[in-house]
Image: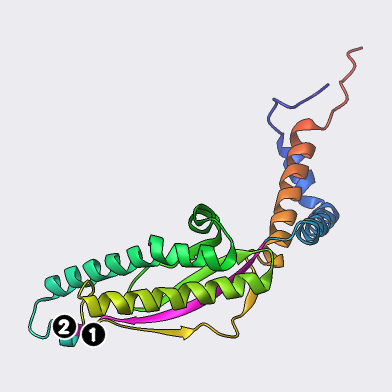
Amino acid sequence: MNYLLISPSLDDLIRLLKAWRFWMFGALLGALLGAAIYYAVPPPFRVQATVNVDFNLEQAWPQETDRQQFYYLERESRKLEEIAWSDDVMGQLSSEFGIPVEELRGEKLHLSQPAEAGWHFYADDNDSQIAASLASSWANAFVAKSQVDVKAGNINEFVKLEATQSKNLLKERRVPLSIYLLAGSIGFLTLAVFGVLFVKPKPESNVS
C-alpha cells in the first residue's frame, strides 16, 4: 500500500528523528553528489575589477542642501551607469574579445550597485584568464570613456574616477564548492525524508 497522500504519524516522525545514522549518511552522500556535480560541470569563473568613483560633493555643491546633493548623486550615477553599458564601451570589448554585445550585456558582465566609492565590474567566463582580462578591460574602458565625457561637460567636472583594481585580479568560481556541498546535502536529505515519510510502503494489518 502506498502512503504518498497520507500524512506521517507521530511514530514516523519520532523514528526519523532517532535515525541519526540516516542523517549522517544522507548528508555525506548528498555532499559527495554535490562535489561530483561541481567537478563534472564546474561553474564559470567570476573576476572582479574595481573603479573608485568620487563625486566630490563638498566641491560640487558646497552650500546646497542634502536633498540637492542626493539628486546630484543620483543623476551622475545614472549617467555613469549608462556609460558602463554604452554601445561605445560594449563595442570596444566586443571587438577586443570577439564576444557579441548581446552576450556581454546578458551573460558575461555584471555591475555592482552604483554609488560613491568602489564600483565593481564582474566578468564571467569558463576561462579564468579571459574573465580576468574582460573585467580589467571593462573597468579601464569605463574610466576612459567617463573621463572623455567629463571633459566634454556631459559629466560633472568634479567627478573623479580611477581604476584601483584592474591588474593581477583574483580568479574564483562564480559559485564556490561549499555551496554545492551544502545544496547536495540539503537536497538529498529533503528527498530522503519525503521518501521515508510519504512513499515508504507499510504492511496492511490482517483482520482475523
Q: Seen in the image, is 108 located left or right of residue 127?
A: left
In the image, what residue occupies the spot 69% across and 25% down? 5
What's the magenta region?
44-57
> Which image quarter holds the N terminus?
top right
**Which color mode does the image show?**
rainbow
Q: Secondary structure at mark 2?
A: helix
Q: Which residue is mark 1?
A: 56
Q: Residue at 74% across / 32% down in the picture?
A: 198
In-front residue for pair 180/137: 137
Q: Residue furthest top?
A: 208
Q: Amino acid under label 2?
A: Ala
Residue 34 image position (x, y, % from top left): 77, 57
Residue 3 horizontal/vertical position (percent): 76, 26
**Amino acid type indicated by mark 1:** Asn
Return the mark for residue 66: none
| Residue toward you, 97 or 156 | 97
Q: Which residue is mark 2?
A: 60
